[in-house]
Amino acid sequence: MRLIIAEKHSVARAIAQAIGGGAEQNGHIRCNDCIITWAQGHLVDLMPPDEYQDGRWKSWNLESLPIDPHPGWRWKVSQAHGAARQYRIIDGLIRSGECDTIVNACDPDREGEAIFRRIITHAHANHPVMRLWAPSLEGHAIRHALDSMQPASDYQGLADAADLRAKADWLIGMNATRAYSVLAGVHMSVGRVQTPTLWMVVDRDDRISRHVSEPYWTVRISMGGWVLTSPRHANRGDAETLASLFADSGTPVSITEVERMQRHERPPHLYDLTALQRDMNSRYGMSASRTLDALQHLYESKLATYPRTDSRYITEADLDTLHRLMDGSWRVDGFINPEARPENPRTQLVVDDSKVAGHTAILPTENVNADILGALNEDERLVLTSIVARMWESVAEDAIHHVIRVTAHPQGHDDIQLTATMDIITMQGWKSIGQQRQKNGEQGEHNPIDNDSRMGMTGGRIPDTVIPGAVIASAGAAEIREGSTKPPKPFTEASLLSAMEHASRYLEDKDLKAALDDDISHSGGIGTPATRAGIIEQLIGNGYLERSGKTITSTSKGQILIDMVAPMHRDPATTARMEQALNQVERGRLDPKQVLEQFRLEAARIPSQAQDIFRDNPDIARHLHATEEYGGCPKCGKPVIKRGKNWQCSTNRRSRDDSGTWTNTAGCGWTLWSVIAGRNLTDANVRSLLSEERIRLTGFRSKTGKKFSADLVIDPERGAVLDFDRRRR
């Protein structure tokens, strides 16, 4: 009999349905010759430092650093609600003697491998182990995966990489967080991945704040239906001199070069997780975590394939499935306008076996049709319709642009260059699918069609009579336009995800840059598609980043943290190198023991690096404690300040006991949490709330995921409460 261990209850049920028969019992399902059970996230975790038996790491002080349990790493059953009970059930099934084989049916990725391996290792299981690798939870996909399982030894590289990542995060996170917190006198969370991500935002915000806008002037000459434009002039007088040439009757223009071309714009690739998260944020303002939550539910509902993928292609073996998805009108009606459906889908565009490392791109399943949309919440509906539309876009015809570029100069002034560009889409191709979504009200405000369909930078159509050597009279006086240089744009969640994915942009080492840009290795980013959303939310939750609409900016606390840590710990290149090493281990190209040794050496240097920084910069701690005031405390009237991710009365004092737990020891105790009913509060929200005592906010979320609006009202005991009755003032 086989014992199948899935990652989640819903996945276990799907496997049972695929096999057929069976009834759910105490934490498991029995059907045919299988017992199916499930984990509940990470049932087994690395033990925190203060729980090691000798007690040497119980107190937070510099003398106990660096912390390094190697080779005596210890693991413990998670303290999360229900975890211990579910672990005992699995452990009992393993020890029962009923099963002669164990099947790893946890999610087919590094995290799923870690969840499974920790359970069977902690339970001292010595059964033969097979790996179930199903791309979706459809019955036929699961049955095919059961028939084609491979020994767990084939995935040892994946398991080694998962183990290494956990230990690297533990070593660097525990040592850095303790070292900088002790030196700063306040808790500071430092991590292998989160701190370089924070640095990218702090660096962008710093460049924005230091930007000095400089004026410039351009000259526009009307040519009767189209416009020639000069380069930028740093001096207005130069622009006025050029404009004067076209006063009164005006100087004719000599055409020196005309380039006419047809440009083909290829369809976009299928979605991987990060690309989907970027689009959902740009179009609908959805956070990366909301997109992942919606996609995960679609996967568990058998409506989408595996979500945590970094591939944007499928394999030759998946072509039959893609053809079935495109057969009939099941995934047309309700998703795209039937008139926009590609007549001859170019499925070869999405096939590349060399760019699929374990997981294919995200696709809908054959269970998807318009009838199921009504049962989905708004986020799930938007995500699913986007996935289906992208499937059609990726195999559609090219969008064809007619592009004309003209170079000219005022007659007799060969040293002055004027230019015009016209870009007209002559065939919409794949863009018509997105255009139809906009007509159906599902596209959102950031629609590329509007920009790409415009007549071009000339503001009109360049006639066919414009040819090299022609001399053409202008159509009136020239116009001078003033502009100014712009600072970099602040990060949105979409652009931050892109920066995390493409860490090679921050590298100077050409060899490492080339390795990180290699599509086959999929190793070019900070974090993984599965973890990036959580990293952003963690930084916001810790009070280092702030989300306002689609914009993400750093807080003063986040900026101080970046000033505080050693350069290598905030450098994306350092983390990118680590991610590359983990990927090389996963593919069997590096020895995991050697990579762990590198991580241990890195962690061992942290305490001395932190002490050097505080010794050389004695004002860091003072700046950290100079906290901004947000208003008066509703309970005692003293100033409200921000500590960590929450706002609280400045009289509050907290201390950490020997167990590492923080408790209030003084003050009135008033605290306002940063997240209320699924909505993150901003600094501006809190200032308004403390000033007005009541503010109207949108974006709250019910337990079922529905958005709602309500008044947020100050409460002296609970911080703030929701009030749905707007008549009360």
Image (tube, helix red, strand yellow):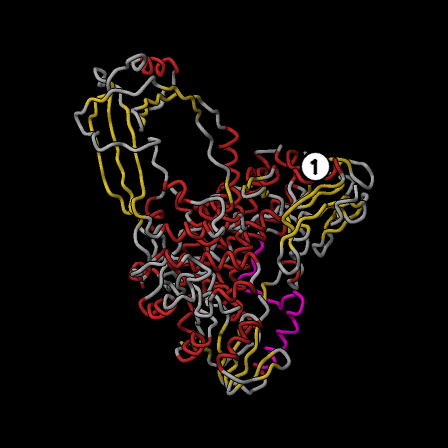
Q: Is residue 143 above or below residue 211?
A: below
Figure quadrant of residue 481: top left
Q: Is residue 621 above or below residue 310?
A: above
Chain part drawn in magenta: 67-93
- The reply, left or right, for residue 252 in relation to residue 108 is left
Rendering coords of residue 317 (x, y %): 33, 70
- The reply, left or right, for residue 437 in relation to residue 230 is right
Q: Is residue 632 above or below residue 274?
A: above
Comparing 215 with 403, the one in front is 403
The residue identified by callout 1 is 687
Comparing 241 with 29, the one in front is 241
In magenta stretch: residue 86: yes
Residue drawn at (23%, 16%), measured in percent from left and top? Answer: 413
- The reply, left or right, for residue 397 in relation to residue 213 is left
Q: SS class of the residue under badge 1?
A: helix
Q: How many marks?
A: 1
